[in-house]
Image: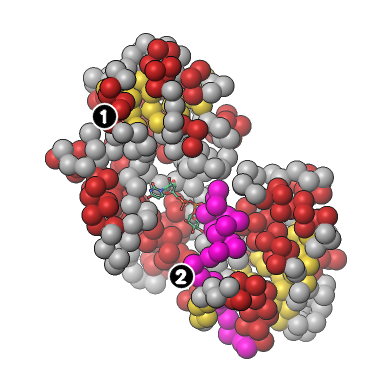
Amino acid sequence: MRITMIGTGYVGLVTGTCFAEFGHHVTCVDKDQEKIDKLLAGQIPIYEPGLDHLVEKNCKEGRLNFTTEITQAVGGAEAVFLAVGTPSSRRGDGYADLTYIYEATREIAKELQGYTVIVDKSTVPVGTADQVARIIKEVNPDADFDVASNPEFLREGAAINDFMRPDRVVIGVESVRAEEVLREIYKPLFLRETPIVRTDIKTAELTKYAANAFLATKISFINEIALLCDSIGANVIDLAKGIGMDGRIGSKFLHPGPGYGGSCFPKDTLALMRIAQEHGQSLRVVEATVEVNSAQKAMMVKKIRDALKGSEAGKTIAVLGLTFKPETDDMRDSPAITILPALMEKGATVRAHDPQGIHEAKRILPGGLYYAKDAYDACQDADCVVLMTEWNQYRALDLDKIRSNMRGNVFVDLRNVYDPEQVTKKGFTYTGVGRS
Ligand code: UDX
């Protein structure tokens, strides 16, 4: 199959590369000349384990190409995927900004040759596919096309595996022809018996938002229960096991922490609330999920303050992990963006380390914090160490070395990575989330 991927951001690059790995001929298009030049030179603009190898291999084997030229890329393609960004609108009202989707649609409309399926891969509000179809008809009344929705459920840091072994593939199609094209594209997965959910376009669009909102809700639920465990003196880890083993609940996404972040949950929960409002409805559970997530970040600041016996002023705090989760360099909506400035405003000095995120952190976080070369350097003369993101390299720290580097002995584990007893034995006072 000949496939064109519009947008070489996270989703476009991973999806395009994996389609090439399936054996399709894929051209990835992006307006950003610098990005395309780098990709052609084998440099990957994001940190995603395994992606560099797959890009290199598929380029070498001639199935994957990168260009800024939409004209050559679209004409003759059997499917054109729209994987451009849909950020929250700059107005700050939670609506998704669809400018890039509509711009890309206008450009591809002119270039269509022969029957083409235009597939929305980006997370877009319900009804966007109708708008895409309307624009194509307006720009190119003779175009022979169908629009489809095929939301992605990739997690950053695990995207290749998620793509190659998905729990399901959702396709929203309203013609047999379009369904056949999508089934052909995903054939290697269906041969492995990956379930397919074939539905109408609107349902597919809404499925993505509902999935993300549900997962975010699970996290906010366990975060609230964790705070209750703190008040009661109960243990949220055992509690999560106790409820998670009920197959109706499931054990995943029940890890309490400093609040969810990233490019999807914060943006998509807000967008879903707006979609509901436009239909005269309010999604109260999702609203509560969003509120709880904001409150959780504030509670983490209080937790650190309490661990420091009531004040962070004049204290040095070592922060381990800045990205919203491990195995990514992504800082978008990371809890660190709220928590660090709050600590610094109260007069704390912050020494931070992250294995991949420092470049982004320097762009986003306020000046005046020290970026350490490793975890031990971060802990130098610190009163308190805060484990913020559970990178593997923080899971087996030499606690004796950390303790001897530090001035104080406060250990705040916002991801419940360490065994409280072992940390206490090393001379620290330990604070976790829902297990203190
Ligand atoms: C998510 C969805 O998982 C994916 O299906 C969708 O396509 C995009 O959004 P991603 O944002 O990459 O993927 O990360 P994910 O691993 O889902 O984690 C999101 C956030 O939730 C992180 O901040 C993480 O730390 C937090 N989280 C996750 C918890 O706090 N507790 C958990 O139990 C799980």
The stretch in magenta equals 154-176
Q: Quadrant of the N terminus?
A: bottom right
Which image quadrant is residue 231 in? Answer: top left
User: Is 308 or 413 nearer to us in this picture?
Assistant: 413
N-terminal label among 2 and 1? 2
Which image quadrant is residue 116 in? Answer: bottom right
Where residue 414 sits in the image (x, y, percent)? 35, 35
Q: Is residue 195 above or below residue 365?
A: below
Q: Residue at x 24, y 25 (%)?
A: 306
Give the side of residue 382 with respect to residue 105, left or right: left
Q: Which residue is mark 2?
A: 207
Where residue 319 sits in the image (x, y, percent)? 44, 26
Q: Secondary structure at mark 1?
A: helix
User: Is 186 or 91 nearer to us in this picture?
Assistant: 186
User: Is 226 or 344 nearer to us in this picture?
Assistant: 226
Q: Which residue is at the far bottom?
A: 176
Q: Quadrant of the C terminus?
A: top left
Query: Dots 2 and 1: beta carbons under 8 Å?
Result: no
Where residue 62 sits in the image (x, y, percent)? 84, 61
Q: Which residue is mark 1?
A: 421
